[in-house]
Amino acid sequence: MDDLKNIVLLLSWVDYLGIALFFSCWMGYRFVLERGEIGRKGLIGITHEYRLQWAMESAAREIPVACAGLTSNLMASVSFYASTTIYIIAGLFALVGSVERLLSFSEDMPFAQAVSSGLIELKLILLIFIFVNAYFKFTWSLRQFNFLCILIGGSPYHGNMPSEEYRVKTAKRMARVNSCAGNEFNRGIRSYYYGIAASTWFLHPVAFIVATIWVTYILYVRDFHSPVLEILRDTYPPELRNYTQGSDEKGVNKQEGSVQQSSR
């Protein structure tokens, strides 16, 4: 308990500002930019529509080998990151046992702030927390892709569909599970980005603040203003937007469809 009090006393107001900004950006990105109208305008919303198109087309394939192959590729990527994260976590735990070496190394770096071993341990704990969170995201994503495989295997062929309503409902279910798995994978990747920002805390708390803002800006630009987003927006078939999730999306879908038709 005394060690914890000493560490708290060692933190300056710049450290506290950096920690508050870090968690606000990391957690706030998900709850502000992933949801609602904002999220539907970014890569998350656009890719969900393509996943819905994929699900609609899968029923037309008598043997959905292509769907199984695509899902396997997605699962391989998630599995790679999950196994890599385990090695990163193991390396960080190993560093906890050699804090003195890390302390001497950080003191030799330019612009590095003089800190105690307790503060170094606190920074390592933050990194461990970030990558443990990433590991949970990747493994949960992997499980959800397994659920997607089950849905693909259980989806009836187009000729055996009881009705068009059943086909649409089946496709929407597959697309939502696919999006849930993909979103968890994105959150795991986002943890890597913020892990890079957290590692700059070893240099200086000001570097920590600057890196957090920079990482958040990079993520925002890629999700909402990247060239690939413009390509996906411009080429998406507007007639399939009628099958999107809720009635609250109809106004946005009609507006985007009219813009696309006028540009032809």
Image: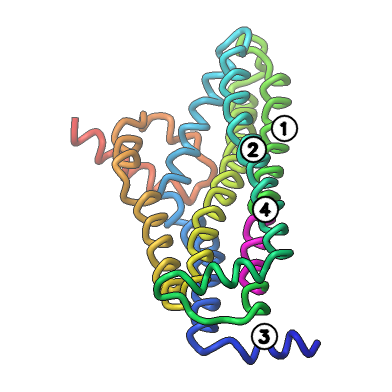
Distance between the alpha carbons at the discs numbered 4 and 2? 33 Å
Q: Do tag 3 and tag 1 residues touch (Cβ < 8 Å)? A: no
* Residue situated furthest left in the rendering: 263
Q: Do tag 3 and tag 4 residues touch (Cβ < 8 Å)? A: no
User: Upstream in the sequence, badge 3 or badge 4?
Assistant: 3
Q: Residue at x 59, y 72 (%)?
A: 103
User: Marks 1 and 4: which is nearer the front?
Assistant: 4
Residue on which disc 3 sits: 7
* Position in image of residue 159 (x %, y %): 62, 9
User: Marks 4 and 2: which is nearer the front?
Assistant: 4
Residue on which disc 1 sits: 147
Q: What amino acid type is highlighted by mark number 4?
A: Gly
Magenta stretch, main secondary structure, is helix
* Position in image of residue 54 (x %, y %): 51, 25
In magenta stretch: residue 43: no
Q: What amino acid type is highlighted by mark number 2?
A: Val
Q: What amino acid type is highlighted by mark number 3?
A: Ile
Of the numbered discs in the image, which one, if any, rests on residue 98?
Answer: none
Query: Relative to 13, is 22 above or below?
Result: above
Residue on which disc 4 sits: 91
Q: Do tag 2 and tag 1 residues touch (Cβ < 8 Å)? A: yes
Q: Residue at x 66, y 71 (%)?
A: 100
In magenta stretch: residue 131: yes
Question: Which image quadrant is residue 140 in?
Answer: top right
How dense is the environment of label 3, judged by Cα within 10 Å: few (below 14), some, or many (20 and up)? Answer: some
Of 85 and 180, nearer the camera is: 85
User: Upstream in the sequence, badge 1 or badge 4?
Assistant: 4
User: Marks 3 and 1: which is nearer the front?
Assistant: 3
Residues rendered magenta in the picture = 122-133
* Position in image of residue 208 (x %, y %): 46, 72
Residue on which disc 2 sits: 177
How dense is the environment of label 1, judged by Cα within 10 Å: few (below 14), some, or many (20 and up)? Answer: some
